């Protein structure tokens, strides 16, 4: 670990990392020797205990490395196609939600977390300028 001259109270308790196009960096096709993949695996496997939170976004969850997916507590699904839904990653998703996933509008998501007894369908409101002509 590196050292710092900062006072402990100045160091944040939590660090949030956002990664778009996660399937480029933590894909099943990325070589095992990839330093980025090693960092992402470390974050997903040990990050929670270190106060590091990873938010990843990708088009196809089925392309993500299984160890990254396996350490995700919360998943948010937006609209996707029938081919993606037929993949193994969606085998535990009830069929009613699979149907919903193919018909969702922009701003709609289905959230899955062990805290919830079932999946949640959420809708973000349109930006305020969209309500007025």
Image: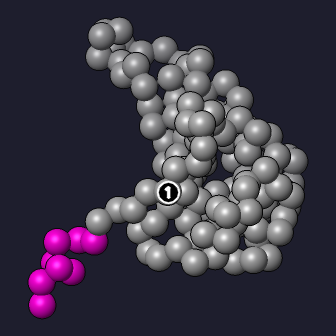
Residue 60 magenta-highlighted: no
Task: Between residue 69 and residue 92, name the one nearer to us.
Answer: 92
| Residue extending farthest front | 96
In the image, taking residue 117 as reference, residue 85 lies left or right, namely right
User: Residue drawn at (65%, 62%), measured in percent from left and top?
Assistant: 97
**Where does label 1 land, which residue?**
121
The spot of residue 65 in percent (x, y) is 80, 50
Among all residues in the image, which is located at the extreme left? 132
Determine whether the residue tagged by mark 1 lies in a helix, strand or loop. strand
Residue bounds of the magenta highlight: 126-133
Horizontal relation, residue 80 to residue 14: left or right: right
Quadrant where the C terminus lies?
bottom left
How many dots with numbers?
1
Which color mode does the image show? one colour
Quadrant of residue 12 within the rendered picture: top left
Q: Could you tell me if residue 89 is visible in this image? A: no
The front one of 69 and 74 is: 74
Q: Quadrant of residue 124?
A: bottom left
Give the residue drawn at x 17%, y 79%.
131
Q: Residue 31: horizontal and vertical position, in percent? A: 86, 54
Classify 10 Å Cα crowding around label 1: few (below 14), some (14-19), many (20 and above). Answer: some
Q: Residue at x 83, y 69 (%)?
A: 86
């Amino acid at each position: 670990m590196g050292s710092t001259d900062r006072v402990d109270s100045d160091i944040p308790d939590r660090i949030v990392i956002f990664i778009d196009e996660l399937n480029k960096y933590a894909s099943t096709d990325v070589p095992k020797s990839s330093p980025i993949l090693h960092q992402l695996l470390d974050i997903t496997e040990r990050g929670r205990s270190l106060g590091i939170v990873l938010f990843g976004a990708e088009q196809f969850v089925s392309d993500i490395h299984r160890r990254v997916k396996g350490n995700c507590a919360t998943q948010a699904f937006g609209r996707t196609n029938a081919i993606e839904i037929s993949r193994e990653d969606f085998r535990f998703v009830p069929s009613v939600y699979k149907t919903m996933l193919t018909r969702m509008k922009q701003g709609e998501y289905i959230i899955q977390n062990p805290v919830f007894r079932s999946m949640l369908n959420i809708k973000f409101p349109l930006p305020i300028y969209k309500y007025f002509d």
